[in-house]
Amino acid sequence: STNKTFTMIKPDAVANGYIGAILNDIIKDGFQIKAMKYIHLTESEAGSFYAIHKDRPFYSELVAFMTSGPIVAAILEKDNAVESFRTLIGATDPTKAAEGTIRSKYANSIEANAVHGSDSDANAEIEGNFFFSQFERF
Ligand code: CMP
């Protein structure tokens, strides 16, 4: 495994005022921020980011949700980053997320689940490259 993952703080968590709390949990868990931006995705951007899910029944709702307000996107670094971050955020469905995880604390539903975390090293690379140029990484 590599040492980088990609995350988004989703529109629900931004609207609910959790940007600071979530970044604090991420930093306290030992992640370093390599790149970060605050943006409002267009339908076309959200659609291509989630293209892997385009045949799922929830795809159009997911794109509508992800364009409903601004997000925070970031590349994070830590040993074993993808797996470590998935442990920190908990299960996709917040009702199944372990106590103390970010989704357990800040998420509302399986769709409005507060944060995204890459599910593999290959996707972490693809997703980071979707948002950030080489000049935006430190
Ligand atoms: P994420 O980890 O960003 O990857 C895909 C997203 O689709 C997921 O988080 C949820 O926001 C959403 N999602 C996954 N499963 C469902 C579902 N069953 N119903 C609605 N949205 C879902």
Image: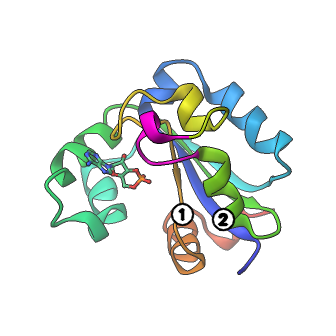
Q: Which mark is residue 118?
A: 1
Task: Work out whether 22 lies above or below 51.
Answer: above
Q: Does 76 sit left or right of 68 as displayed?
A: right
Please tell me in which quadrant of the rendered image residue 84 appears. Answer: bottom right
Please tell me in which quadrant of the rendered image residue 23 appears. Answer: top right
Residue drawn 49% across and 39% down?
Answer: 71
- The three-letter amino acid code for the residue at tag 1 is Ser
Q: Which mark is residue 63?
A: none
Q: Does 78 sit left or right of 100 as displayed?
A: right
Callout 2 secondary element: helix
Residue drawn 60% across and 60% down?
Answer: 6
Q: What is the C-alpha distance between the residues marked 2 and 1?
A: 9 Å
Task: Work out whether 135 lies above or below 26.
Answer: below
How would you rate the neighbour count of disc 1 (Cα within 10 Å): few for under 14, some for 14-19, many for 20 or more? many
Quadrant of the frame with the C terminus: bottom right
Q: Position of residue 88 (x, y in %)?
A: 67, 47
Q: Position of residue 43 (x, y in %)?
A: 25, 49
How would you rate the neighbour count of disc 2 (Cα within 10 Å): few for under 14, some for 14-19, many for 20 or more? some
Q: Nearer the viewer, mark 2 or mark 1?
A: 2
Q: Does 24 sit left or right of 118 as displayed?
A: right
* Residue 96 falls within the magenta-colored stretch: yes
Quadrant of the frame with the N terminus: bottom right
- The three-letter amino acid code for the residue at tag 2 is Glu
Q: Position of residue 63 (x, y in %)?
A: 26, 48
State the predominant SS element of the stretch in magenta: loop
Bounds of the magenta segment: 90-97
Residue drawn 64% across and 38% down?
Answer: 101
Q: Which mark is residue 83?
A: 2
